[in-house]
């Protein structure tokens, strides 16, 4: 997938051909995803600080709170507005 930021930056994220929470709705796989990625200090910092990055977009959009990709995108946009505006 690709995120296009307002400054024109493109950030590619996700695994081509891979399945995510929005595909399978498997809460155990979602838990395991976060256990792996939050154990990585660099990824954890990017995610928790809402720094635009593949780590953030994968965790929030593909493995996010909802099993609906549009709801996850809406939530991330709301969080961005709170932080950056």
Image: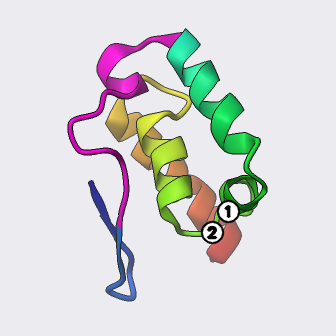
Taking 13 as reference, is 33 above or below it?
A: above
Q: Position of residue 55 (x, y in %)?
A: 54, 55
Callout 2 touching callout 1 (CB < 8 Å): yes
Magenta highlight on residue 15: yes
Q: Which residues are magenta?
A: 12-27
Indicate the quadrant where residue 71 lies: top left
Q: Position of residue 5 (x, y in %)?
A: 38, 76
Q: Secondary structure at mark 1?
A: helix
Disc 1: which residue: 46
Disc 2: which residue: 51
Q: Residue at x 56, y 55 (%)?
A: 56
CA gap between label 2 and label 1 equals 5 Å
| Residue 27 left/right relative to 42 | left
- Mark earlier in primary sequence (2, 1): 1
Magenta highlight on residue 26: yes
Q: Which mark is residue 58?
A: none
Is most of the magenta stretch helix, strand or loop? loop
Q: Quadrant of the C terminus?
A: bottom right
Q: Residue at x 42, y 24 (%)?
A: 21
In the foreground, 42 or 73: 42
Q: Position of residue 75 (x, y in %)?
A: 52, 45
Q: Secondary structure at mark 2?
A: loop
Q: Residues within 10 Å of mark 2 (few under 14, many from 20)?
A: some
Q: Position of residue 43 (x, y in %)?
A: 67, 56
Taking 13 as reference, is 65 above or below it?
A: above
Taking 48 as reference, is 6 above or below it?
A: below
Q: Residue at x 34, y 15 (%)?
A: 24
In the foreground, 78 or 15: 15
Q: Residue at x 52, y 52 (%)?
A: 76
| Residue 76 left/right relative to 84 | left
């Amino acid at each position: 997938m690709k995120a296009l930021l307002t400054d024109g930056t493109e950030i590619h994220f996700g695994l081509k051909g891979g399945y995510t929470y929005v595909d399978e709705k498997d809460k155990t796989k979602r838990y395991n995803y976060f256990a792996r990625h939050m154990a990585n200090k660099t990824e954890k910092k990017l995610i928790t600080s809402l720094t635009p990055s593949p780590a953030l977009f994968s965790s929030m959009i593909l493995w996010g709170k909802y099993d609906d990709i549009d709801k996850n995108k809406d939530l991330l946009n709301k969080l961005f507005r709170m932080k950056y505006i």
